[in-house]
């Protein structure tokens, strides 16, 4: 199996591999399956789904952080609406099997790191420490943006 097709035209490679897998399932003897790359690609699909859920959650948290850091900014209402939308999308993307591997503390740290301090002319309000992203933010479709905000910014 030439490796260069996987590198140069993943689409065609994937169609060929799918065809070979179907033939194998039908009982045909198939010797030219690219097993290593097929396995890698299948694992990649799962990692991509996990990263999509995490990325959407990070976006939700990041938008809530902007609302908290710059409460008087004209975009605050839009940030809050976007935060709620990102949370809903994250909940849709989430699967229970992700609970074992999703790094919620890392997602929170990444959102803090991405907060665009330098874009604003006014200094930010301090963000409270000690908050966390609970797994319920993803696993419970009834978990709201208000619930997430309370978890991220607990009263002092």
Image: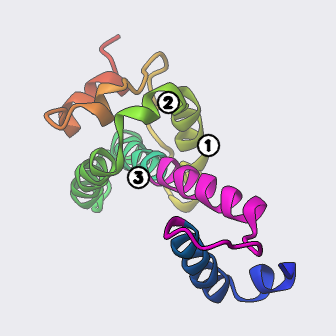
Residue position for label 3: 56
- Residue 118 coordinates in the image, percent (x, y): 60, 56
Q: Nearer the viewer, residue 147 or 24?
A: 24
Q: Quadrant of the C terminus?
A: top left
Query: On residue 104, which mark appears?
Result: 2
Work out whether 16 lies above or below 126.
below
Name the residue: 67% across, 63% down: 38
Residue position for label 1: 113
Q: How many marks?
A: 3
Q: Is residue 36 magenta?
A: yes
Helix, strand or loop status at disc 1: helix
Question: Mark 3 near mark 2, Cβ–Cβ under 8 Å?
Answer: no
Q: Quadrant of residue 8?
A: bottom right
Q: Quadrant of the N terminus?
A: bottom right
> In the image as oriented, which residue stretches furthest toward the left?
142
- Say whether disc 1 or disc 3 marks the residue closer to the N-terminus: 3
Mark-to-mark CA distance, 3 and 2 = 12 Å
Q: Residues within 10 Å of mark 3 (few under 14, many from 20)?
A: many
- Say whether disc 3 or disc 2 marks the residue closer to the N-terminus: 3
- Residue 72 coordinates in the image, percent (x, y): 29, 50
Mark-to-mark CA distance, 1 and 3 = 16 Å
- Say whether disc 1 or disc 2 marks the residue closer to the N-terminus: 2
């Amino acid at each position: 199996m030439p490796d260069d097709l996987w590198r140069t035209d993943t689409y065609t490679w994937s169609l060929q591999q799918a065809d070979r897998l179907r033939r194998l399932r039908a009982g045909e003897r198939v010797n030219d399956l690219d097993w290593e790359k097929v396995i890698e690609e299948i694992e990649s699909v799962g990692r991509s789904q996990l990263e999509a859920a995490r990325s959407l959650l990070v976006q939700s948290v990041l938008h809530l952080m902007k609302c908290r850091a710059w409460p008087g900014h004209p975009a605050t209402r839009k940030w809050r609406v976007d935060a709620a939308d990102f949370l809903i999308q994250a909940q849709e993307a989430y699967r229970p099997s992700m609970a074992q591997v999703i790094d919620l503390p890392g997602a929170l740290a990444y959102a803090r790191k991405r907060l665009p301090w330098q874009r604003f002319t006014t200094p930010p309000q301090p963000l409270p420490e000690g908050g966390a992203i609970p797994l319920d933010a993803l696993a419970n479709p009834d978990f709201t943006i208000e619930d997430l905000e309370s978890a991220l910014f607990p009263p002092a």
